[in-house]
Image (cartoon, rainbow, N blue to C red):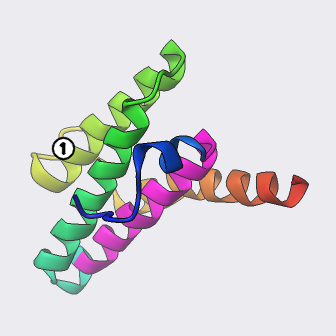
Amino acid sequence: MQHQDLTKDRWANFTLREQLANVGSEVIRAVNWQKKGNIQYATLAFYRALELIDLTLAKPLPLPELSEIARLREVLVDYFGGGNIYQSSEASWKSYFQAFTLAAALEREKT
């Protein structure tokens, strides 16, 4: 487990937007390390992203959210470890996760 101090209960207290913003941080970190040629750090960030996705999938989710998160995991694995058949790009990952980061920030402002 990469996130030693993160428990399922603590993770479950985050909103889905916050969870995906955190996943996005790891994904963007992996992309940036990959771009710099540091495959070891890129791989570790990728594994942390998968760990967070798996924690998200471990809680009960409505079917649309469950499908979205499961597909996200599939496409991430394809991008970092497969043949990139979905033709993901650095720009597409940044765009996808930027929306969750912004939504989570706006959500925090309301509380």
Q: Nearer the viewer, residue 47 or 60?
A: 60
Q: Tell whether 87 sits left or right of 21.
A: left
- Does the stretch in magenta take in 106? no
Position in image of residue 25 (x %, y %) = 46, 65
Q: Residue at x 16, y 67 (%)?
A: 43
Residue at the (63%, 43%) spot, across then down: 15
Work out whether 81 lies above or below 90: above
Per the picture, the main secondary structure of the magenta-coloured stretch is helix
Of residues 60 and 37, the one drawn nearer to the viewer in this rendering: 60
Decide: is 4 above or below 54: below
Q: Is residue 4 above or below residue 77?
A: below
Name the residue located 18 percent from the left edge and 39 percent from the top edge. Answer: 85
Question: Is 21 one of the magenta-colored residues?
Answer: yes
Instruction: Tell me the element at label 1.
Output: helix
Q: Quadrant of the C terminus?
A: bottom right
Q: In the shown orientation, is residue 35 left or right of residue 105?
A: left
> Going by the image, does 27 lie left or right of 24?
left
Towards the viewer: 40 or 12: 12
- Residue type of the residue flagged with mark 1: Asp
Residue 88 position, x and y percent, is 31, 49
Instruction: Locate residue 8, reporting x and y percent.
Output: 42, 44
Task: Check disc 1: other Cα within 10 Å, few if <14, some if 14-19, many if 20+.
Answer: some
Residue position marked by numbered label 1 in the rendering = 78
Q: Which residues are magenta?
A: 14-33
